[in-house]
Amino acid sequence: MSLAQSLPLAARVVVGLVFVAAGILKVGHPSDLGAAIVAFRLDLPSAFVGFAAIALPLFEIVLGVYLLLGWQLRLVSIAAFALLLIFIAALVSVVVRGIPTSCGCFGPAETDPVTWWTVARDGAAIIPAAYLVWWSWRRAPATP
């Protein structure tokens, strides 16, 4: 396998596994995830928080599986990149405002407060996600 073939595969696997792991660790814990979202003090409507606490883990799992399988890569890579941008922006907001809360990124067992290290850890996934967006849009479209 050439480097041109292995880089997109590696990026898909890394980002896909991050999303699958994050989703699996949050599934079944909507109250914990909802509390984590509220603790970020983003003034989101409670209906949105409730919906996100249930839907986000499932969306992360589906997104991760699609990345791992390479399905709908153009759309899925954009969704993954956008979701990571939203997560990173929320984390930066928490650190800048000095809110002592846990991330909740990988389920209720993650109890350490959000720091710049958390931002860097979660932000690291945006590099392969950005590469996938670029790679999936620059390659020739599939012919029917």
Image (cartoon, grey):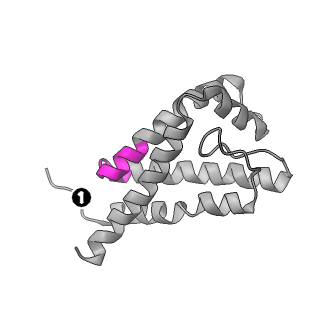
Circle 1 residue: 141
Image vertical order of residue 130 relative to residue 106, above or below: below
Vertically, is 43 above or below 138? above
Prevailing secondary structure of the magenta residues:
helix
On the image, the x and y values in percent for residue 55 come to 52, 30
- The residue positioned 73% from the left and 55% from the top of the image is 92
Q: Amino acid at mark 1?
A: Pro
Q: Is residue 3 magenta?
A: no
Q: Which residues are magenta?
A: 63-75
Crowd class of label 1 (few under 14; some 14 to 19; many from 20; radius 10 Å): few
- Toward the right, the furthest residue is 98
Q: Position of residue 3 (x, y in %)?
A: 30, 77
Please identify the residue farthest to the left as the structure is shown: 144
In the rendered image of this protein, does residue 42 appear above or below residue 3? above
Spot occupied by residue 14 in the image (x, y as percentages of width and height): 43, 59
Considering every residue shown, the one lying at the far bottom of the view is 3
Side (left or right) of 62 relative to 100: left
In the picture, measured across the screen, residue 62 lies left or right of residue 85, that is left
Does dot 1 land on a helix, a strand or a loop?
Answer: loop
Q: Residue farthest to the top?
A: 47
Between 115 and 59, the residue placed more toward the observer is 115
Q: Residue at x 36, y 45 (%)?
A: 65
